[in-house]
Amino acid sequence: MKKNIIRYCITALGCLLMALSINAFFVQHHFLSGGISGVSIILYYLTGWPPGITSLIFNIPLFYIAWKFMSRQFFIDSVIGTVLFSLALDGTAFVQAYVNIPDKLLCCMAGGALGGLGGALVYRSEASTGGVDILGFLTKKYYNISVSTTNFLFDCCVMLAAVVFLGLTPVLYSLVLFFITFKATNLFMVGFDYKKQVIIVSTHAEEISQRIMDEVNRGVTILHGEGGYTRRPLQVILVVVKLTQLAHLETIIKEVDPMAFVTIQDANNVFGRGFTQPNLDLEEERRLRK
């Protein structure tokens, strides 16, 4: 119960930030949102209907679909997320009178960053704001069409309708806004503490591994490979390091084996000892293993 309360509090915060981004930065320049809320915002621009209530009404048939075809937990999360977002969207409409930023590109950047943070919080809490997500999960379950594909196709329809009723310029700015929001969501989901996954193929694997453990204080994994041309057995080192440790690691590799083959990749959502759990020094680890 306590875990669910915390999860829904995070969902509420995420919905609040998403709603603030729309009312503070979207509305003044007739920017658009995606999904069902995008349809509601178009109607708001044309008729003045409150987008939160309109979005909630549009979601009612989708709630029935979620109840009938999806799990009960998904249904509950969708209803809670949609209601919270709808209340936040209409409840924060007052900020429109206090925010006036003539620069449209600046509004795209600020709105995308704030909306991306809100979306990341909603996704982190494993919740949903309903809408097209319900159709997306349904098509994925029964037709093996990805959620992102369904969302993309629906958003394309929203954009085409917006071009007809609002003109091309707001739609083009909205596309920039979508891109910034997408990037911001991914950034806040992964976090700012970047990690690098390094794969090292060397004939001096033992020495490099020892120096990494002693000097960088990172554990390593030795993989057993084979040269494709020579068919000789090879030891391959796999190690994940923080960005601040990468330069030291490269120095070690160059000093021990300048001919080593190295690949470096971004590593996301790293968890385990030394990252999300306390790191043991080598002597303590050896003692615990005995």
Image (spheres, helix red, strand yellow):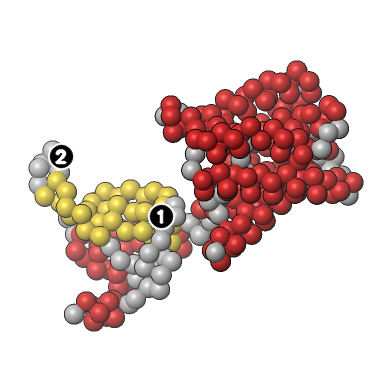
Q: Which mark is on residue 5?
A: none
Q: Are marks 2 and 1 in contact (CB under 8 Å)?
A: no
> Residue 219 appears in which quarter of the rendering?
bottom left
- Point out residue 26 in the picture as x, y percentages from the top left corner: 77, 39
Residue 156 position (above or below residue 181): above
Which quadrant holds the N terminus?
A: bottom right
* Residue at figure coordinates x 52%, y 48% from the top left: 73
Query: Helix or strand or loop: what does disc 2 sit on?
Result: loop
- Point out residue 167 in the picture as x, y percentages from the top left corner: 78, 21
Residue that mark 1 sits on? 196
Q: Is residue 40 found left or right of 129 in the rendered image?
A: right
- Point out residue 185 in the picture as x, y percentages from the top left corner: 58, 47
The residue lying toward the viewer, choosing from 223 and 202, is 223
- Point out residue 146 in the picture as x, y percentages from the top left corner: 47, 32
* Residue at figure coordinates x 66%, y 44% from the top left: 82
Query: Helix or strand or loop: what does disc 1 sit on?
Result: strand
* Amino acid on which the number 2 mark rests in the picture: Gly
User: What is the spatial separation of the Cα atoms under label 2 and label 1, in whole angstroms?
Assistant: 26 Å
The residue lying toward the viewer, choosing from 181 and 220, is 181
Residue 290 position (above or below residue 97): below
* Amino acid on which the number 1 mark rests in the picture: Lys
Residue lying farthest right? 97
* Residue at figure coordinates x 79%, y 29% from the top left: 43
Q: Which mark is on residue 228?
A: 2
Which quadrant holds the C terminus?
A: bottom left
